[in-house]
Amino acid sequence: PQAIFRKDYVAPGYWVDTVEMGFDLDLDATHVATRLTMRRNPDSAEKDLVLFGAELKTLQLRLNGVNLKKSAYTIDGETMRIPNAPDEVVLEIETLIKPSKNTSLSGLYASNGNFITQCEAEGFRKITWFPDRPDVMAKYTVVLRADKKKFPVLLGNGNLIEQGDLGDGRHFAKWEDPFKKPSYLFALVAGSLVCQEEQYKLGSGREVLLQVWVEKGNLDKTQHAMDSLKNSIRWDEERFGLELDLDRFMIVATSDFNMGAMENKGLNIFNTKYVLANPSIATDVDYAGIESVVGHEYFHNWTGNRVTCRDWFQLSLKEGLTVFRDQEFSADLVGTSTGRAVKRIEDVRVLRQVQFSEDAGPMAHPVRPDSFVEINNFYTVTIYEKGSEVVRMYYTLLGHEGFRKGMDLYFARHDGQAVECDDFRAAMSDANGRDLTQFERWYSQAGTPRVDVQTHYDAAAQTFEITLSQSCPATPGQTEKLPFHIPVAMGLLNSAGQDMPLHCEGYEAQAGVNSLVLELTAASQTFRFTQVTEQPVASLLRNFSAPVVLNISYSDEELGLLLAHDSDPFNRWEAGQRLATRRLVRLTQAVQAGEPLELDSMFIEALRATLNNDTLDPAFRELVLTLPSEAMIAEEFEVVDPQAIHTARQFARAQISQHLRADLLSAYEQHLTPGKFSPDAVSMAKRSLKNLALSYLLEWVDESTFELAKTQFYDAENMTDRLAALAGISNFRGQPQQQKVAAKALQHFYKEFKKEALVIDKWFMLQATAHTTDVAKVRELMTHKAFTLGNPNRARSLTFNFCNANPAQFHATDGSGYALWAELVIALNKINPQVAARLARSLDRWKKYPLHLQEKMRAALEKVAATKKLSKDVAEVVTKALA
Ligand code: DPP
Ligand code: ZN
């Protein structure tokens, strides 16, 4: 497949001023009439009028009122070129499309008999011919016509300006979007839907209409999304001075959706997973996910829609920034400082586990990529999560006020424009008078930087030196890396664990401030501290101030001190993870060598102290007590042995269970949340610690703890507790009697929720990730009547979770997991290339495994690569993996 390069960017030959569209909606054959007014862009090197189209039946093409002859244009793949067009053009296009046949869920498609669209990145070209690129921004007016009974609701972008009857059983609605937008933000929805709605008063006093649209039967699950929307609106006003610019804002939930949600102007379309919630179907994690995704899409209205991307290489301009905004929104909503830290730890965990892994594999790419084959493959954790870390580093370097000044300048300069990542950096730099030239490397260089730390204390001179040396591993197409501009937030602890005053040469000391942001810009730099009255312990990279790997050799005692006392809660947690990782690596090696396994009392006592420390937020304690995942442990090894890692981690869990049994039981009892369910931070924190305690108790189980889980499963009235208990019992490898109980509970759960698709997804997910689920069991579950590869959520629930989150079983030594993977990718490729390409990424890191597994993985990759009619999406992923 052919790659597209950032350096080849050429401005569009024509601008589009207005777009008028008429849709005659029919599931099997929708007729689309489009009228574009266009004018030549005198500043472009492109002289032709260029349009893109895909899978269209073109009925009519008229330029300035004259039918376009076949000889007047050329079509090559998706590109139509009209040479010699005049400077001013009115183009009329009629196309015919087949929504019911569209299984790719890109463009206009059918979901449970309703019409849904998804146009980002390049879905609009499946609706009509258009210069479908984000830098072409136009004003849209859209008329929707459809059967009144089957499609009583007709929604579009912007404002509803007219609606009525057409006679003949059909009706229409006319929508006008007052703002210029790129085609990827176009949306329409038509069907049988119901909504929760509310008039909401903005900070300025202006009233707006908020609506959450769902299929019938789901109106009891929309309140949390509505609350989250209102919170988002208020937060963006307060934190960034950004107001909703429309008179109405709509959210629509659909069960067939490739992504999480989509920020179409005024008409956000969401995966049901990020809208529907009530206590009986949604877990605390779901509630938090809804809040952050509703926030994310709403915040795009400014960061993405009002200011958009010049081209898709700039995707992180809107995504990195909007993830940063949604992370801050969730953190601000929690309110407390440990609540903030808990959110930060959760976000960093995802970054390290998924993004660091991507950065170390064949798909590694810079935050602003230089090339791609299929843009849909670049909606990645690098663009989103690493992109957010890059934005966060501006925040760390410039401070709260400085960052806000940069944001204000960004909007003052670029409102209504399609711009580049460099424009954002320039706004941050100019608003603060800061030279951020070197900072550009965070956008251009892929790979996770390493920072090695050496320290030296001179007791006589009372000086402490910290030498930081950075490097970055080679990534595909980038062998040499230049030094990054790395903010390293830090402090020094004395032997009592207190922060010491900081006197660092070259940095101004501030009274009462015991944390400092060092700026590492050279390959190696030494920072010298004076008046250091005793040997300190350095707490570096506080709050994870940069997306790097920090190599520092702490003793267990130093880590114990940091875990018990660091004023930075992130580094407190980090110290606990370092203690755990060290042990899990040793245990894995012991498993491999057939040596006896042992877990030392220092570590167990540190966990006990944390568990029993009532001054700490239960959510924070839960994070400290959670061992690094098998995927994180795998990153510590050159060659990964998934089964040994699993055995080692399970051994550690059982040891913790055995030694902390009384403490875990008491934590369980102390954190019950009786009474009415509430998804507030305090209750959620209690449930998370209680359920962690339960999961540990089940690792060293007896009658009474098993009974505890069983009772919780049958008696709890909220999904958080029920799912946690079910996961505990179904993961259980005990007596046949208990296994019978587990099977019965699973069956009971299925029966109770068989009409709730999102809960059945959980049911599949839970089994996909159970330690006992092997390849044969997955194949059996695939034959279940509720399973289908045709629905992305369902496909992900079973197959993605097995391939990505059950490593010890997926990497079965006979290669059966890989064979299953290949079959699934090939089957999905025919249905939905975007979803197939996501699953294809499960073998990205195949070169990290022992040779006998590598051979089997390569064979599976080659089998997929050799498949006929392979989509660009999948081809790009497997080609890069095999390169
Ligand atoms: N819908 C995706 C998101 O909001 C892509 N823009 O991130
Ligand atoms: Zn986004």
Image: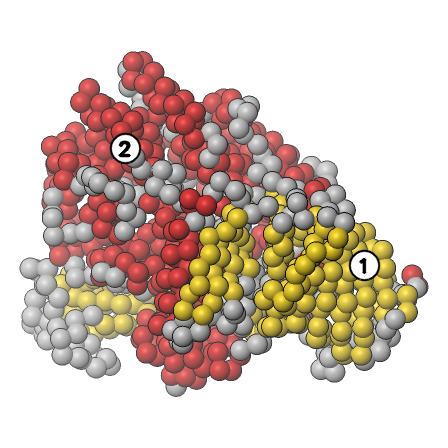
Compared with 552, 705 (above or below) is: above
Three-letter amino acid code at the position of disc 1: Glu
Residue depicted at x 41% and y 84%: 431
Q: Position of residue 692 (x, y in %)?
A: 25, 38
Asked which secondary structure carries label 1, the reply is strand
The residue where tag 1 is placed is 94
Q: Give me the C-alpha separation between circle 2 and circle 1.
A: 56 Å
Q: Residue 716 carries which label?
A: 2
Where residue 88 sits, quadrant-wise, is bottom right
Q: Position of residue 802 (x, y in %)?
A: 46, 33
Q: Do the residues labelled 2 and 1 touch (CB within 8 Å)?
A: no
Three-letter amino acid code at the position of disc 2: Ala
Q: Where is residue 153 in the image (x, y as percent from the top left)?
A: 61, 52
Answer with left or right where residue 687 lies relative to residue 459. right
Residue situated in front as seen by the camera: 730 or 591: 730
Q: Residue 418 carries which label?
A: none
Answer with left or right where residue 858 lies relative to residue 587. right
Dot 1: within a 10 Å radius of its alpha carbon, few (fewer than 14), some, or many (20 or more) residues?
many
